[in-house]
Image: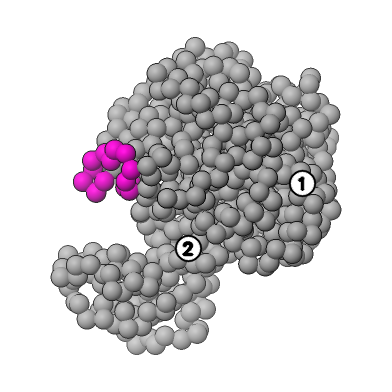
Amino acid sequence: MSEIYDIPARVREGSDSPLATLDGWRAVRERTANDPDGFWLDVAKRRVKWHREPTQGLEGSFHTIPDGPIQWFADGTLNVTESCLDANLATRGDKIAILWEGDEPGQVRTLTYRELHAEVCRTANALKALGLQNGERAIIYMGMVPEAAIAMLACARIGAIHSVVFGGFSAEALRDRVRDCGAQAVITQDEGMRGKRTIPLKKVTDEALEGERGVKKVLVYRRTGGDVDWVEDRDVWWHEIVPEQSDDCPAVIVEAEHPLFILYTSGSTGKPKGVVHTCGGYLTYAAYTHANVFDLREDDVYACVADVGWITGHTYIVYGPLANGATTLMFESLPTYPDAGRYWDMVERHRITVFYTAPTAIRALAAQGDGHVTKYDRSSLRVLGTVGEPINPDAWRWYYDVVGEKRCNIVDTWWQTETGGISISPIAPATPTKPGSATLPMPGIFPVLMDGDGKRIRGPGEGRLCIEFSWPGQARTVWNDHPRFVATYFQHYPGMYFTGDGCRRDADGYYWITGRVDDVINVSGHRMGTAEFESALVSVDAVAEAGVVGYPHPIKGQGVYAYIVLQPGYEPSDAIEAELHAACRTQIGAHAKVDLYQFVPGLPKTRSGKVMRRILRKVAEGEPDKLGDVSTLADPSVVAAIVAGAKV
Ligand code: PRX
């Protein structure tokens, strides 16, 4: 029996949500099963400002997806910034929309809804002046400054499609994304700031764009004043073009299925995919889940400390909170700068009520001792969220007991870039929790567990997590590659969306995500493909072959373990390791770091030449006695060498 935590009284009190009790959740869930179109149309009309209200719910299904994307609210028209900005002006014009905390503690900037509206309009006019048009793509390669959110909204204001690239990605990774989406413009800043370190965003942009003809304009926000190179006729300073623009910019009205953004994410094979989200369905789902999971209240100070470079930042820093008229915090720095008390210092100073972070941060901070937490007043907190990777029960309990003083509910939210918003999670005032479980599905999400033979598991059991019916927030396609979208998500189990995750369902119907079952690894909540690492590693001259897997890591969740086969004539050395390290950094980014290298005489392969990744995984997980059947190996002696030299 696992422990169950009931909801602290103060989390339940004062909630007026229909989902504020488990019975309420059941009733809503039943409606989403019996009348999904009616339910989601109601939500869409309530949460989103439409130019023309939709009358249609879902068109298409997971069975018809190979022939064309799913559509939601197809006859509706809107501009998402009207929900996020204009709709809040009358009632909340002077409420703080964005509360920015910079790299230094207490370095604060605020933008009210009125100010944000004006700034987005000016920036949208600037983008128009630079030639960016409805339907064209702009890459946003920035740190955590309000201007990153402003740039996203400014694109949306004029119907342009943004693609935010996390500021840790390298020039090569940035160039790949610029090319793949055919970007006409890049929006960046001179440098990013994190824990006193500067990140040379403009320099990396310049490298990425060398020889790229498609990008006509680069808009550069000045954050630090650091020196940057300048390309005449291409580069434009934000402060030279934006302030002089009119703060009136009529929103370009688009169809519900107009793409809002492309976000690149890693998969099992090949290069990252450009996951496409569209305006009407995405915004509906972002606003609905944000309001309900966290049980948002009008006077909440809501803080999600993710980066806008990932889906969490899109949905739960920018679009969901602004559509709900919330005060949303943007945090530029690190949880450990200047010390491990930074988050709780911010909670005290800003009176944060809802706080949302990743298990990695929780584990890292727990390891620094309780003193960094208890020295600050956390009495404002009501809901504590986690996202991005499985949270181990110890870290969960520390979050609950120490950070939340047993007064807050924990929402362990499971979702993905592709799902657009939270899909399995407690509803803060309604769902009793179990440490380590994402608990129950959101209304409208119908999870299914499939066994190894492709059969549906009923009741308790463990299998592969799929979702049976469409929901408005789901990704519609992969940019320029619908066949890849179909092959990745809809072909494993016909008629179902396959998540790539393993999952257990217990006797109470609670879901426990066990991690990826494909070749994706999740390091500190950063999703990376083993294929991306392998391709970087084999680009080093000395390397013949590379096999990369994840292994359990006490803080990062997973670490990266690389098996390296050298070319004849090369010996393992520190110099080669340094080269391998540099290859990952330049081809993927600073966050792509191999933790352990093992030099091996060969990779374990079947007689048909396929690498048996299971063996690589088991050895890296410290379970060499559980290799299973190795009789199909071409050369069993390779396994003995791998086991003998294991690094764990
Ligand atoms: O493996 C799951 C893990 O993160 C993956 C999705 O990564 P990404 O698209 O980058 O989005 C992360 C932020 C939504 C999932 O396939 N994951 C995410 N949340 C959880 C999780 N694993 C366990 N528990 C979670 N709460």
User: At 57% from the left edge and 58% from the top edge, which residue is drawn?
Assistant: 395
**Circle 1 is placed at which residue position?**
379
Magenta-drawn stretch contains 463: yes
Nearer to me, 108 or 295: 295
Coloring applied to the structure: one colour
Q: Earlier in the sequence, mark 1 or mark 2?
A: 1
Q: Position of residue 453 (x, y in %)?
A: 21, 46
Span of residues in magenta: 451-464
Determine whether, in the image, residue 188 is placed left or right of residue 464: right
**Circle 2 is placed at which residue position?**
558
User: At 70% from the left edge and 28% from the top edge, which residue is drawn?
Assistant: 14
User: At 65% from the left edge and 33% from the top edge, which residue is drawn?
Assistant: 12
Quarter in which the C terminus is drawn = bottom left
Q: On screen, 428 above or below 92?
A: below
How far, Cα to Cα, is label 1 from label 2?
33 Å
Q: Is residue 368 visible?
A: yes
Nearer to me, 552 or 538: 552
Choose top left, top right, bottom left or bottom right for residue 240: top right
Nearer to me, 601 or 199: 601
**What's the residue type where badge 1 is placed?**
Ser
Q: Position of residue 295 (x, y in %)?
A: 64, 33
Q: Secondary structure at mark 2?
A: strand
